[in-house]
Amino acid sequence: MNITITGKELKATEAIKDYVEKKLTRIEKYYANENIDVTVTIKKENASSEIAEMYVSVKGMSYKAVTEDKDLYASIDKDIDILEGQIRKTKARKEKMIKDSSIKQMNISGLEPEKQIEDEVIKLLSYEIKPISVEDAKLKLSEKKGNIFYTFVNVDTGKVNVLFKLKDSNNFGLVEPEA
């Protein structure tokens, strides 16, 4: 990490330099093994406030933070918080773009389309079958608008029957087993 500290109307003491270096380790963790250039400018604005400006350049990206506080160390802390937020936001945005583009790449390039499932039972519905008359079964089927068939136990024969709507939607068909 290359750090340049400049003081305007304020001397950059060894304590300030050490403090800045210590705080910049929070930034360094985001870019391990990368060349990071940091320019810090400290200045006294008026009798009651001090300003810290930080510019960070890494991997073609630039980040900037400028804060003013009564205490220079507090101003440095605020700058570090701002820079860390900017870096975190940028890295998250890049990771999302990479993830989205890799998903698009997979869809476009190359995976075989899903094979169609054939000759398999792919959906199973279970429900209780009650003994009712054919007339009651017609009423139940008419109540359920989306259904085209109704399975029931015929009260007269004791066998499982299937009542279905015909294509004309006005009449019904009945399936009854022989045995």
Image (cartoon, rainbow, N blue to C red):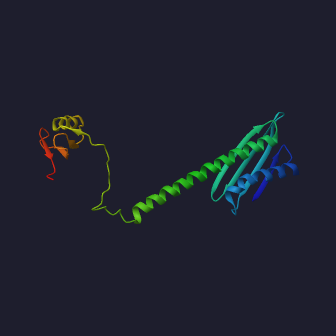
The answer to whether residue 126 is left or right of residue 29 is left
Instruction: Examine the image and state in which quarter residue 36 appears.
Output: bottom right
Q: What residue appears at the point 66 percent right and 50 percent down from the top-left corner?
A: 63
Question: As displayed, is residue 60 above or below residue 133?
Answer: below
Image label count:
0
Residue 46, quarter of picture: top right
Q: Where is residue 31 in the image (x, y as percent from the top left)?
A: 68, 58
Above or below for 18 versus 152: below
107 horizontally vs 172: left or right = right
The percent coordinates of residue 7 (x first, y second) are: 82, 47
Residue placed most toward the observer, 80 or 68: 80
Is any part of residue 126 visible from this angle?
A: yes
- Image quadrant where one finds the N terminus: bottom right
Residue shown at the point (32%, 47%) measured from the top left: 126
Q: Residue at x 73, y 54 (%)?
A: 38
Residue placed at 64% from the left, 47% from the top? 86
Residue 74 x %, y %: 79, 40
Q: In the rendered image, is residue 166 in sight?
A: no
Camera-nearest residue between 47 and 38: 38
Image position, residue 160 (x, y; %)? 21, 47
Where 108 falls versus 123 (above or below)? below
Instruction: Pick the residue in front: 32 or 65.
Output: 32
